[in-house]
Image: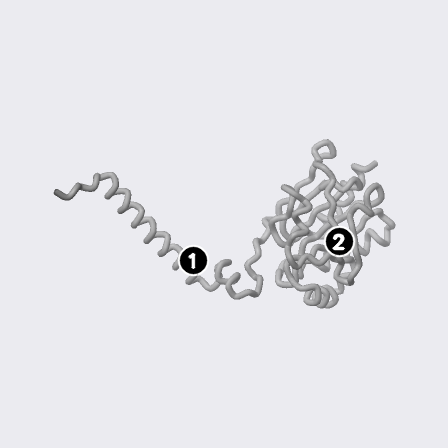
Amino acid sequence: MTPRTPRYAVSRRRALGVASVAALLALGACSSDPNSIAEQAKKGDQKGYIAGDGTIEQIPVDQRLDPITLEGETLDGRQWSSTRERGKQVVVVNMWASWCGPCLVEIPHLEKVWTDVQAAGKPVQFMGINFRESPERAAAAADKAKMTYPSLSDESGVLILAFGRQAPTTTPSTLVLDTQGRVAARASGPVSETTLRGLVDDVLKSES
């Protein structure tokens, strides 16, 4: 006599089968969209970035976490470390890439604020993080955009790990470090000149 399979086992198999079919159909539906992030990523053109939602966060002095140490090689081959600026300057860090359209639109606004703070003699350093592309391609893009502030090369995408749980998750992203090297403000997505000036000035004021 052939043993009977318990009803719950049959039901479970059927449920798993239905779930598997549904998953395959969903996967097929996603991959069939040429504009989906998955399809863009497959093309290898790095257009599958996550866009920021414009969120701005300012962190009170007594709530800032430990200082971060960001260091690496700039696009022009110089070694740089955020520890050099400790006790002296506020550091504005911007994550960007030439394959990120909003990043390229944002660069002239960053450049304007950078030249203005320099002209005003404010203790502020700008530093880009060029994310996941070759230094050669990044340097060409920076030159075309007339970017005069330096950028670290992050072809492997590991430099942002220095920020720990405060690491940016969108491109572009901008973080303002106080003179102790702590994250004092963050902008997710493109930031306007007015907003960036305000963030920088507020951090400078918190230092006094």
Q: Secondary structure at mark 1?
A: helix
Q: Secondary structure at mark 2?
A: strand
Q: Earlier in the sequence, mark 1 or mark 2?
A: 1
Look at the picture and state if 193 lies above or below 98: above
What residue do we see at 25% from left, 41% from top? 9
Q: Is residue 99 left or right of residue 179?
A: left
Q: Is residue 177 left or right of residue 131?
A: right
On the image, the x and y values in percent for residue 193 come to 72, 52
On the image, the x and y values in percent for residue 152 come to 73, 56
Q: The residue under label 2 is which amino acid type?
A: Met
On the image, the x and y values in percent for residue 145 come to 72, 65
List the single residue furthest toward the top: 62
Numbered label attached to residue 30: 1
Q: Is residue 79 left or right of residue 163?
A: right
The residues bearing labels 1 and 2 have C-alpha atoms spaced at a distance of 37 Å
Q: Is residue 44 left or right of residue 145?
A: left
Where residue 100 sits, quadrant-wise, is bottom right
What residue do we see at 71% from left, 58% from top? 153
Numbered label attached to residue 127: 2
On the image, the x and y values in percent for residue 85 come to 82, 46
Q: The residue under label 1 is which amino acid type?
A: Cys
